[in-house]
Amino acid sequence: MVYGRGETCMKRMMTMLKVEGKLALRCPDGLIFGVGMPVGVLCLIGIIAGDQTVSGQSSYTFMESAFASLLTVGICATAFMGLPLTFADYRDKKILKHFFVTPISPMLMLFIQVIIAMLTALLSSIIVSAVAIFGFGYQMQGNVWAFIGAYFLVVLSMFSLGMIIASLCKTVKIANVVTTFVYFPMLFLSGATIPYELFPSFLQNIANILPLTHGIKLLKDISMGVSSEHMFFSIGILVAFTIVGCVISVVSFKWE
C-alpha cells in the first residue's frame, strides 16, 4: 500500500516536471540570461584575452580569473529571474490557490519549480565549463570536489534569497521591479561581470555586504588553488544567508 502511494506520487512528480519544464521553455528569459549571457561573455574573454595574465596576478590568466564568476551568473539568473517571476505569475493568476482543490499538492508544484531552476543553473554551469575546457583549454588549479561543494553552497544561498522575493511578491509587475533592483546591482557589485578589485574602496565596502561577493571569492580561491584566510568567513556568510533566507521565505510565503 505504501509502495503504491509512493509510486503514484513519483509518477505525478515526473508528469509535473515534464509539463512545467515545457512551460519554462516557452519563457526563455532564464536560458538567455542564465546560459546565453555567461557563455557569450566567456567566449569574448577567451577570444580577446583568455591566455593573457591578470595585472598584478601574473600566475593567473583572465580565463582562470573569470571562470568562477561566470558560473554564478547562471545561478543568479535562475534564482532571481526564474523562481520569483514564476511564483508571482502563478500567484497572480490564482494558480497556486487552485492547486488546493486538485490531487496535486501545492508543495509538490513549488518543489518542481525549484528543481527546474536548479537544473537550469546546472545546465548553464555545464555548458560554461565545457566551452572553457574544450574551447579555450581551461584547467582548474584547485580541488574539483571542493569547488563542487562550494558551488552548491552558493546555489543554496542565492536560491534562498530568490525564494524570499518569490514569497513576498504578489504580482509579476512587483516581482519584475524587485528582481531588477536586486539582480543587476548584485551582479555588477559582486565581481560577476566587472572585477571586484577595480572598484573604489567605498563600492568594495558595499559589495562586501552581498552574499554573492563572498560566493565568487570562495569559488575563485578554490578554482585557482589559493588558500585564503577569508574562505571560512565567506562560507559562514553563505550558510547564514541560506538559513535566514529559508526561514523568512517559509514564514512569509503567501499562496494568494
Image: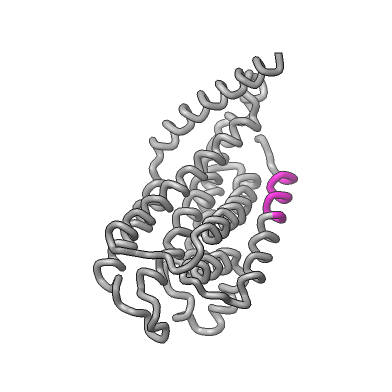
Residue 112 location (% of width, % of height): 56, 34
Q: What secondary structure is the magenta-colored segment mainly?
A: helix
Residue 91 in the image: above or below residue 8: below
Q: Residue furthest top?
A: 1
Image quadrant in which the N terminus is located: top right
> Percent from the top left, x then y, of residue 168?
65, 47
Residue, x 30% and y 63% (percent of image)?
Answer: 137
Image quarter where the C terminus lies is top right
Residue 213: name its quadrant. Answer: bottom right
- Classify residue 4 as left or right of residue 115: right
Q: Nearer the viewer, residue 40 or 170?
A: 40
Residue under the image location 69 percent in, 42 percent down: 253
Residue nearest the viewer, comparing 160 with 140: 140
Looking at the image, residue 195 lies above or below residue 77: below
Q: Is residue 180 visible?
A: yes
206 is within the stretch colored magenta = no
Question: Could you tell me residue 73's position as x and y percent?
Answer: 45, 58
Q: Looking at the image, which is closer to me, 173 or 128?
A: 128
User: Looking at the picture, does residue 90 appear above or below residue 104?
Assistant: below
Q: Quadrant of residue 88?
A: top right
Left/right placement of residue 237 relative to residue 149 reads right
**Residue 75, placed above or below residue 61:** above
- Residue 189 appears anywhere in the view: no
Picture coordinates of residue 65 (x, y %)? Answer: 41, 71
Residue at position x 65%, y 32% in the image: 107
User: What coloring was used for the rendering?
Assistant: one colour
Residues shaded magenta? 243-252
